[in-house]
Amino acid sequence: MKKQSLTGEVFYPSEEVVQKALVKDWEAMDVEAKRDYPGFWGKMAEELHWFQKWDKVIDDSEKPFYKWFTGAKTNIVYNCLDIHVKTFRRNKLALIWEGENGDVKTFSYFALHRETCKFANVLRSMGVKKGDRVTIYMGRTPEIMIAMLACARIGAVHSVVYGGFSVESLSERIEDSNSKVLIVSDGAYQRGKIVPLKQIADEALQRCGTVEHCLVVKRTGIEINMEQGRDMWYHELMNLPIATQACALEIVDSEDPLFILYTSGTTGKPKAILHTHGGYMVGTYTTLKYVFDIHEEDRYWCAADPGWITGHSYIVYGPLLNGTTSFLYEGAPNFPYPNRWWSMIERYGINILYTAPTAIRGLMRFGEAWVNRHDLSSLRILGSVGEPINPEAWRWYHRVVGKEKCPIMDTWWQTETGMFMITPMPCVPLKPGSGTRPFPGIEMDVVDENGKSVKANEEGYLIIKTPWPAMIRTVYKDPERYKQYWEKYPGIYMTGDSARRDEDGYFWIIGRVDDVIKVSGYRLGTAEIESALVSHFSVAEAAAIGLPHEIKGNAIYTYVILKTGIEKSTQLIEELRQHVSHEVGPIAKPEHIEFVDSLPKTRSGKIMRRVLKARALGEDPGNISTLEE
Ligand code: WT7
């Protein structure tokens, strides 16, 4: 890549960053990976431990149900913990945690391994076996990581439900996964208040009947109900003689399930995306290592929540596979003051910060002075994920936080991809708002309705052309739904995003083309919001859309038809907003509710959200020939 040949606003990496970078020549790596991508991933996999080597890197005999590293035996936890305990990393910090209230805990690799083993023994003693699903519903504390790792160690399949979800979302996910064990915390600190997680879980458990044991981590000490015979304290279980620190690791097949994670799709209920031990391990290990340029002495902070894929891949598994030191923070970025994040970066000497555009925009609002009070010179690399980053936020992040010396890794990926797909590396020239190009070994394109590549700078569907190791294996219990990703263009994976590619081959994400709304980077389905509204006695019909919002990226706007005889009132609007928050979660609370008498629908009865959106934005709704009436 020659300097002169790039168009638009370009930031070239500094000499210092490139000097240190593990990959100095992106093109060479890409060429090698393109020549033989199974060979490329096989080589990456060699860096990890396998109890038995694979017969084949990739098995495509049952497309689109691809298998990776078939015949191999492993367990991701062995590579996350056991391996390091045998080396000099034994006493290296795996995790530094700071609670919102100032509590601090640290875990060396030895300690994290010990706690994981102890808890794995607790789970085993409750009858949890390989393949069983366990639901986890907790705040951002070390125990959520311990719970995930303990499940994986014994071959159980974790299903983490983000703590920002509420009663119906939780109950639906417990029921669908048929979990017999639920792990919760009593509550979580958030902006000086306590989110009553156990109380929400109690209500969820009344709606579903699968859970036999509920294990409760005491974080806040708030008063909670402990149901006899069902609920047990984590700290008491961890003190029992069964909770020894010797715990045999379950050796699993490369393709055995590691976790399911529910995410929103176009229609209906959230789907459980299934990931497996082997390929996911290779994909997250490799991408984190090269994109965030992990060095032995680094302190890395991914400020996402473990309850989303970002947290699974790049708070829990990726960092531990790389033997790095992670930082985890429990609470809100602006508590008690807007300098909380900057203060922690200074105090802990964080080198790598990975966050979302919405957080950057939120912190930007408080002004530079809060950032400038702190010495952030430890930072070397920054990252962004979850939604397109607007160039203004990018420049602020680059200039004010990174002092113009830290490259920003704008990583595009999804719950389904498991790992970074479009991303720079520190040695690559950056354009604010673009994730640059696909990671070596990944082939992507922007195509039209017929699957043909569009011209430079034209908008089209973003697709993935070749399989990748951390790819979704199926939708749990619903393989037909998995096949839908591959149906529009046979053999090609549909991302659900629209994008364009510029004359330099840089990808620019535009947004979702389906009924998924990204609110503050959180992925929500219009169907979930609408069904929550309709579950209220006063609502006959509802439609939800996303409209641009300065900080959240998108905000939820809803249109509601009330049942006959129900009076419209501002009080009812507030009640409906609260209802959605109670059922789905505070993240789904509509920004705006408008009462209407009818909704634009197709003759077959489908709500035309596109028309609602155009109307709200004062734009031309385009083709409305299918509109009823
Ligand atoms: C959707 C996937 C994967 C981590 C968190 C999101 C959007 C994600 C970017 C980015 C523009 C992005 C896409 C994608 N998205 N990262 N860097 N630039 N858009 O995972 O909840 O499964 O959402 O998030 O629309 O399809 P997710």
Image: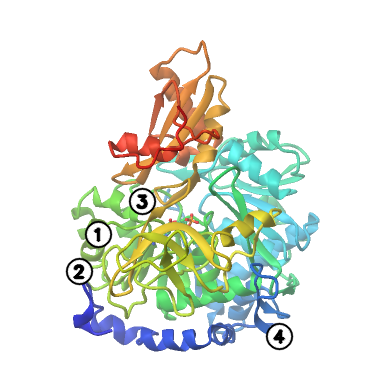
Q: Mark 3 falls on what kind of element?
A: loop
352 vs 488: above or below? below
The residue that mark 2 highlights is 9
Q: Position of residue 605 (x, y in %)?
A: 54, 33
| Marks 4 and 3, how far apart at CA | 47 Å
Query: At 61% from the left edge and 61% from the top edge, which residue is drawn?
Result: 146
Q: Mark 4 falls on what kind of element?
A: loop
Q: Is residue 373 visible?
A: no
Asked if the residue under mark 2 is in contact with the one under mark 1, i.e. CB atoms within 8 Å, the reply is yes
Please give the label number shown on residue 333.
3
Amino acid type, label 2: Glu
99 vs 168: above or below? below
Image quarter for residue 555? top left
Q: Nearer the viewer, mark 2 or mark 3?
A: 2
Report crowding for label 2: few under 14, some 14 to 19, many 20 or more residues within 10 A (C-alpha): few
The residue that mark 4 highlights is 55
Query: At 65% from the left edge and 71% from the top edge, which residue is drawn?
Result: 66
Report crowding for label 1: few under 14, some 14 to 19, many 20 or more residues within 10 A (C-alpha): some
Amino acid type, label 1: Pro
- Dot 3 or dot 1: first in sequence order is 3
Amino acid type, label 4: Asp
Q: Mark 1 falls on what kind of element?
A: helix
The residue that mark 1 highlights is 391
Report crowding for label 4: few under 14, some 14 to 19, many 20 or more residues within 10 A (C-alpha): few
